[in-house]
Image: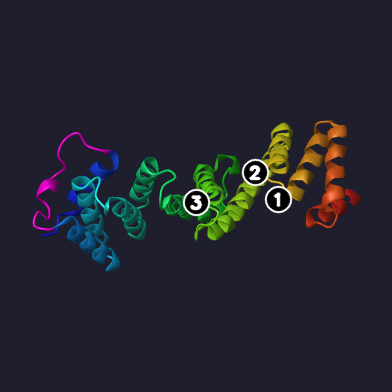
Amino acid sequence: MKLKLSVVLAIVACFLVGCSSKTPDIADLYKDQTEAQIYNAGVYAMKKADYDEAVKRFAVVNVRYPFGPYTRQSQLNTIYSYDKAGNSALALAAADRYLRLYPTGPDADYAYYMRGRIYFAENHSFFDRHFDVDFAKRDTTGMKHAYHDFSVLVHSFPKSPYAADARQRMVYIRNALARHELEVAQFYYGYQSYVAAANRANNVVQHYQGAPSVPDALVVMVRSYRKLGLMKESNDALQVLKLNYLNSNAYKKFEISEKK
């Protein structure tokens, strides 16, 4: 007989974070089945998209057989099941637990990939939209977490089957973060906060070299330094813009505005 979802969540929560007392009825679940039978039934449930049943069975495997042959794979399957069920919080908790136990072990690349992909999925649409809000208040923490996980995957497991996709996502994240910094710089410039504008634009140039937002960031620096009366700094930024991005739209628009 299936347990109610609340009981399933209680069992898995204890599995993920640890409990000092016995989890609800977990010792009595599937007593007539072997570890292999419990695990295989969980895999079957997972394939049938019955993710509540799957995570319940994988939790039982991990609690009852913490050193068994199916333990590690049950933890990986738990990450997958929660992700497919749309429960990103528990999927991240499962990935965190796996990486605490096996930071460089078998399938750690998958755990890093899944954790990074979940963070990515939660945040990328936020960067693709344009809101009428203060850009400086956007939270980039999730994207930075995703970038970190993909970076660990690419550098520690370069031959991983997930590495190529992780690299592509890293490029997207890097460009998105650079665009965010540029939007913040432009926001400050529009409100005549020229020191803040110059600093945020400089951050784009210094830390996101090669990103499409760099030429526009240099333009912000040129204009901000001028407003502050810092002509040497403004001219230096302009020289960098001319030498490296002479054919960019940012420079062409800047030239047109200078002639007006």
**Mark 2–mark 1 distance (CA, rounded to whole Å):** 9 Å
Left or right of 71, for residue 238: right
> Is-magenta flag for residue 25?
yes
**Mark 2–mark 3 distance (CA, rounded to whole Å):** 16 Å
Residue 213 image label:
1
Q: Secondary structure at mark 2?
A: helix
- Residue under the image location 77 percent in, 49 percent down: 215
**Which callout, 2 or 3, points at the residue further toward the start of the chain?**
3
> Is-magenta flag for residue 219?
no
- Residue under the image location 87 percent in, 49 percent down: 243
Residue 181 image label:
2
In the rendered image, residue 246, in percent from the top left (x then y), is placed at 85, 54
Q: Residues within 10 Å of mark 1 (few under 14, many from 20)?
A: many
Left or right of 238, for residue 163: left
- Label 3 belongs to which residue? 123
**Can residue 139 be seen from the camera position used here?**
no
Q: What span is colored magenta in the figure? A: 18-33
Q: Amino acid at mark 3?
A: Asn
Q: Amino acid at mark 1?
A: Ser
How is colour applied across the structure in the image? rainbow
In the rendered image, residue 198, in percent from the top left (x then y), is placed at 74, 36
Cβ atoms at labels 2 and 1 below 8 Å apart: yes
Q: Relative to residue 224, is residue 91 depicted above or below?
A: below
- Residue under the image location 29 percent in, 54 percent down: 74
Cβ atoms at labels 1 and 3 below 8 Å apart: no
